[in-house]
Image (cartoon, grey):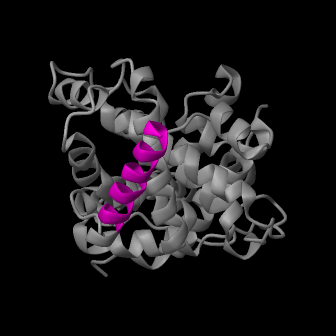
Amino acid sequence: MSKMTCRACSDFLADYLDGQLDPGIRATFEVHLDKCRNCRAYLEQYAAVIKAGRCACERENEQAAGALPEELVRAILAAQAERGNTSDA
Amino acid sequence: MNGARLAAVVCYSAVASPTETTPTPPSASPDQALVDALRSHAPGAFEQLVRTRGGRLLAVTRRLLGNEEDARDAVQETFMNAYRSIDRFEGGSLLSTWLHRIAVNVSLMKLRTRKRKPEESLDHLLPAFKDDGHFMERFESGSEPADVRLSRIEEQATVRTAIDELPEHYRTVLLLRDIEGLDTRDVAEQLGITANAVKLRLHRARQALRTLLAPRLGRPDR
C-alpha cells in the first residue's frame, strides 16, 4: 500500500493502537498521519475516549466500594444462610 | 514522524491495550486471611466479603446489565458462586479480581438469557467520508490534550452517560474490552460471535463514543 486515505487510516486505528498492524501498513499509516493533521486529531480523540471511559468507570467503581445497599447485603446473607441450612439437612 | 508525536503514539498504545498490562501480584495478604476464614466457615467471614467487595461488583453488573434488579441478582449470584467455589480460589490472582471475573461471567449469562434484540444501528454516529476518502468533518486538537480534558472528574459523569447511550450490542463489547479488560478471544467466546465481529463492534463503539463526546473535545479556549 503506497498511499493511504483518511478512510483507510480510520479503519486501521484500533489495530494501530494495539500494536497489531503489519509493519508495511504501519509505515504507510504513519506517513499518512505525519501529513494529515485531521487524522492526527481524530487519533488523539479516539485514544482519549478509550482512556476516559476507563477512568470514568474506575472512578465509579471506587465510589461504589463499600456502598452495597443494606437490603441487598441482607438478602445475600439470608440466601447464603438458607443454602447453608439446606446443605446441612 | 517527529519525536513528540511518536511519544504520544506510544502513550496511546499503552492506553489501548488493557490486557497487556501486568497484574499487580498478590501481596502477603489480607485476602488470604479472608479466604482462610471463608474456607473454615468462620462466623462473619462471608458478611465481611459481601460488605467489603460488593459495592464495586454492583457497579460492574449495573454497567453491563443496565437494569438495577438484574444487577442486584447478579451480585447475589456472584457471592453464592464464590462461596461455593472458594476452595478452587488458588491465590494466583487477587480475590477482588477473581470476584470481578465471576461477576462479569454471571452478567454475561444473564445477557445471553435475555430475549435477543435486533441490532440497533449506530451509523449516524460514525464518521462520514468524501468520495476521495477524506473525512467530511474537521477535527481540532485543543490546547489541552483531549484525554486530560475528558478525564477530569467533572467530565466523568458525561463519559459514563455517553457509554450508556450506545446500543447494547456495541456497549457490551466496549465494556468488556476497554473497561473490564477481557481480550478479544474471550469476548468472542462469551458472546458467541467471531473475533472479527468483536473487533469491528469495538471500533465502531469507540467511534460512536467519540462522536457523542465531541462537544467536550473541541477547543475550550476559543
Residue that appears at 21% across and 58% down: A66
Asked whether residue A86 is drawn in magenta, I would say yes
Magenta residues, as a range?
A72-89
**Is B108 or A78 nearer to us in this picture?**
A78
Residue that appears at 35% across and 32% down: B3
* Residue A47 drawn at (x, y percent): 47, 50
* Residue B11 drawn at (x, y percent): 37, 37
Residue that appears at 25% across and 66% down: B152
Residue that appears at 62% across and 27% down: A20
Horizontal side of residue B179 vs A2, given as left or right = left
* Residue B176 drawn at (x, y percent): 55, 47
**Is B126 or B195 nearer to us in this picture?**
B195
Quarter assignment of residue B144: bottom left
* Residue A11 drawn above or below residue A60: above
The quarter of the image holding the N terminus of chain A is: top right
Q: Total of numbered circles in the picture? A: 0
**Is B179 or A76 nearer to us in this picture?**
A76
Asked whether residue B136 is drawn in magenta, I would say no
Horizontal side of residue B166 vs B33, given as left or right = right
Q: Is residue B208 visible?
A: yes
* Residue A42 drawn at (x, y percent): 53, 58
* Residue B171 drawn above or below residue A29: below
Please identify the residue farthest to the front as the structure is shown: A89
* Residue B217 drawn above or below residue B25: below
Q: Is residue A58 visible?
A: no
